[in-house]
Amino acid sequence: MLTRFPPEPNGYLHIGHAKSICLNFGLALKYGGQTNLRFDDTNPTKEETEYVDSIKADVHWLGFEWANELYASDYFDIIYAFALNLIRKGLAYVDDSSPEEIAAQKGTPTEAGVPNQFRDRSIDENIRLFEEMKDGKYPDGAKVLRAKIDLASPNMHLRDPIMYRIKHAHHHRTGDKWCIYPMYDFAHGESDAIEEITHSICTLEFIPHRPLYDWFIENLEIFPSKQYEFARLNLNYTVMSKRKLLQLVEEGHVEDWDDPRMPTISGLRRRGYTPASIRDFCERIGVAKRENMIDVSLLEFCIREDLNKTAWRRMAVLDPIKMIITNYPEDQFEEMYSENNPEAEDGDGGRNIHFGRELWIEREDFMEEPPKKFFRLGVGLMVRLKSAYIVKCEYFEKDANGNVTEIHCTYFPESRSGNDTSGINVKGTIHWVSVDHSHSAEVRLYDRLFKVEDPSNEDEDFKEYLNPDSLQIIPKAYIEADLANAVPGKGYQFMRKGYFTLDKHSTPDHLVFNRTVTLKDGWKSPPTP
RNA sequence: UGCCUGAUAGUAUAAUGGUAGUACGACGGUUUUUGGUACCGUUUGUCUAGGUUCGAAUCCUGGUCGGGCAACCA
């Protein structure tokens, strides 16, 4: 078995491409075959080396090794010879008609097309004209080479499809060598055959092309590659077409192709998704011919499952409020040990965290009038400070606007974590950092890019449905000191807040974290009576 | 109103013509120094009408609904 992943280098890869990559490489891996990476670069006006490089990087990052790095443009000489071959068989002709004339002569799905006078040109004349096309004797659009098949076919793709068009354009690989370029239909299957691809896997919209794919292969008498189709991936609350993604970038709705809200591979990477999580996702969604709409919650499940096993736990307070432990000595500090990951056998090591009289805690972990089953703080309530002591809230202070500014607690010295003789049982455990030892960092929280499940399928322009709150920047969050050693590309769990990773713009002086995904949140505040 | 294609729980995806299963979600419970994790349980499905058959999600016929096809794009 030999498969191929055949992107056109005209944009960045997205999660839908990941499905195709996992399918093509996965199938070959499963059945002891190989996979080629082939760039479908037959349209020089849209393609760039920048895209080639990013595509290679993304496929590699996903964890796949291609057998050969190939380009459709490598085959231009062979494909040209194929065309001559068909002309000699009387199966192709040069047509001087304009695009509009060709379209008109093609008819409609319910009416047959009509032949024009060029269809009967002699083989010799066709050869001469085609060579002249190649030699640059004609301007763009003056002539095309067409396959002579059946203008009355119920399949529009068989009504004498265009094989070659004239484009005096610079190609990112072949330079100015060519001024005629084969169309997709006369390049893709031919490239497959040249490489002896056994399974040419593509998406559903190419089903009507398959008879043409087969027709060229049969009449050229070349390796019989076979085309198979599957339904492309659709994810809700986002868009997946290159055109729309490009628009989001160009109109500044997102920062760039790798904006963490984008469904691109580079965006997911910057957001903190791992290759394993994306491969797992592609495995779970399955492959079929049915049109589908996958729920993003499945993608989120996959990254949580991966990161839960690998991410080190750290404490960070995103919306801080000060807690003062009134019975803790002012100049005293302690180091509290906390394991890196409770999922690992040995905790995967650990680190010490400074504890003192003044701490930052999460504003939402305190309520003036806590409802029943609120296992956090309120006057008279007790919680465990993770890896430290149990504290009891005594009172709180408010400013003139009614905002809570400080929470005063007392702690139980005999309740120290790992050495608790207090006999006190509390329901809640909250995270915290020391006011005197924590660092600050910018934290970026992301939400779905669109407000509706299927923005492309709504009445208005898809951009009308952008979620205005898809990015929330917290300029100053407090993080435990050890997070200053955070490594790019590694995921961290900010306890109770989600998984985070360093952003590419982060510097030692100005740390920036992206939230990959929240933790699953089972807490539902009880209905207010 | 031409041709092609598809239809199984909320979303996906399985089932030589032989017990409709799995995952995610939702809901409930146990454990828990993360309202996380883990574990246990509950919930909901073969588009429709006929036919073949001892037996149909599967085969046949009609219908309904969805998607695609008439770029010198891929």
Image: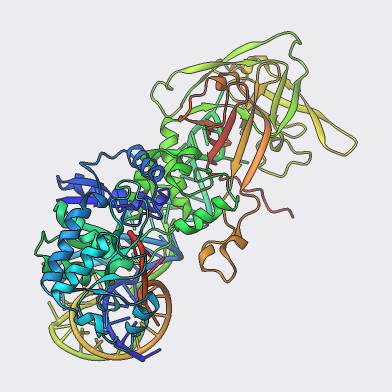
Residue A240 can be seen, yes or no = no
Residue drawn 28% across and 54% down? A178
Residue A414 lies, in percent from the top left, at 64, 15
Q: Is residue A183 above or below residue A110?
A: above
Q: How many labels does the image show?
A: 0
Residue A456 can be seen, yes or no = yes
Q: In this view, does A523 lie above or below A163?
A: above
Q: In this view, does A201 lie to the left or right of B70?
A: left
Residue A158 lies, in percent from the top left, at 24, 76
Q: In this view, does A386 lie to the left or right of A300?
A: right
- The residue lying toward the viewer, choosing from A452 and A329, is A452
Residue drawn 29% across and 48% down? A174
Q: Is residue B9 left or right of residue A508?
A: left
View extreme (top): residue: A331
Residue A409 lies, in percent from the top left, at 75, 24
Residue A45 lies, in percent from the top left, at 40, 55
Residue drawn 30% across and 78% down? A156
Task: Give the quadrant of residue A145.
Answer: bottom left
Q: Is residue A369 above or below residue A295?
A: above
